[in-house]
Image (spheres, rainbow, N blue to C red):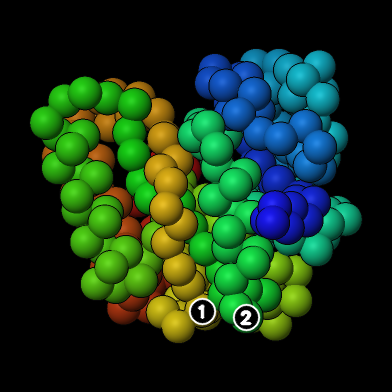
């Protein structure tokens, strides 16, 4: 018997994301609703998204605000939040269908495994660290995608209008018991790690997580992060 394939609303926040966006969109199922929420790009991101069949919403910049706006506009019962530089693998829709058919699926959100489009040892080490963080701390980031039913999304309060850490904020409200990892890897561009330095960027990300954990406001952390 074929697995159930409910329609998805895929929400992608963008800001100056034309590079790589075509690959992200090409990996999606055109039968789903694709919503690109652009925060004021000046590199043709919004036009590119429209040309490739996505519905575009334009908002003020801020990933938390953009994700919330996309969710509010979505029409499907299942939501998939995805970064603009993250590409889902062939067959991902079947893996998602498996989640749909699992017991009490509507009560659990899901993320993909983390992978980078880089062959270096640094990339493999980072992937292992992320796998540990997710297993030990139940803290996937937005570059692993987040699949969630509208009922659960609304129940936990959805994305808050944070300039940074909006993904951590939401998954902390979900908690370990309402989160699972799908048997497929979402591949994210390693461009920022190569540009900033593998150790420097990873250390900065870890610092931001620690500051958020002890209650430093996201606005202050965003200034440190440079967003």
Mark in front: 1 vs 2: 2
Label 1's element? helix
Depth order, front residue of 9/63: 9
Quadrant occupied by the N terminus: bottom right
Q: Which mark is residue 178?
A: 1
Q: Residue at x 48, y 72 (%)?
A: 179
Give left or right: position of 210 versus 149: left
Name the residue beneath numbered marker 2.
Answer: 104
Residue 72 x %, y %: 82, 60
User: Measured along the vertical axis of the image, is residue 198 above or below residue 144?
Assistant: above
Residue 31 x %, y %: 81, 37
Q: Residue at x 70, y 52 (%)?
A: 2
Per the model, the C-alpha gap separating discs 1 and 2 is 10 Å
Q: Residue at x 75, y 24 (%)?
A: 49
Q: Quadrant of residue 133?
A: bottom left
Depth order, front residue of 42/83: 83
Q: Residue furthest left?
A: 121
């Amino acid at each position: 018997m074929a697995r159930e394939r409910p329609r998805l609303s895929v929400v992608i926040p963008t800001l100056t994301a034309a590079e790589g966006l075509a690959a992200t969109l090409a990996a999606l199922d055109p039968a789903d609703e694709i919503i690109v929420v652009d925060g004021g790009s000046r590199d043709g991101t919004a036009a590119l998204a429209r040309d490739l069949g996505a519905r575009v919403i334009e908002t003020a910049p801020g990933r938390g605000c953009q994700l919330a706006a996309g969710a509010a506009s979505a029409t499907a019962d299942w939501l998939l939040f995805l970064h603009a530089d993250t590409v889902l693998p062939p067959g991902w829709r079947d893996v998602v269908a498996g989640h749909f058919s699992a017991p009490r699926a509507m009560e659990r959100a899901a993320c993909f495994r983390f992978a980078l489009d880089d062959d270096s040892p640094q990339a493999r080490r980072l992937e292992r660290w992320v796998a540990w963080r997710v297993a030990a701390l139940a803290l996937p980031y937005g570059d692993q995608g987040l699949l969630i039913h509208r009922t659960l999304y609304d129940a936990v309060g959805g994305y808050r209008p944070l300039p940074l850490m909006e993904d951590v904020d939401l998954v902390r409200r979900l908690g370990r018991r309402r989160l699972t990892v799908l048997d497929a890897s979402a591949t994210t561009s390693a461009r920022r790690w190569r540009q900033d330095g593998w150790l420097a960027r990873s250390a900065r990300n870890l610092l931001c997580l620690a500051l958020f954990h002890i209650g430093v406001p996201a606005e202050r952390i965003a200034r440190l992060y440079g967003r």
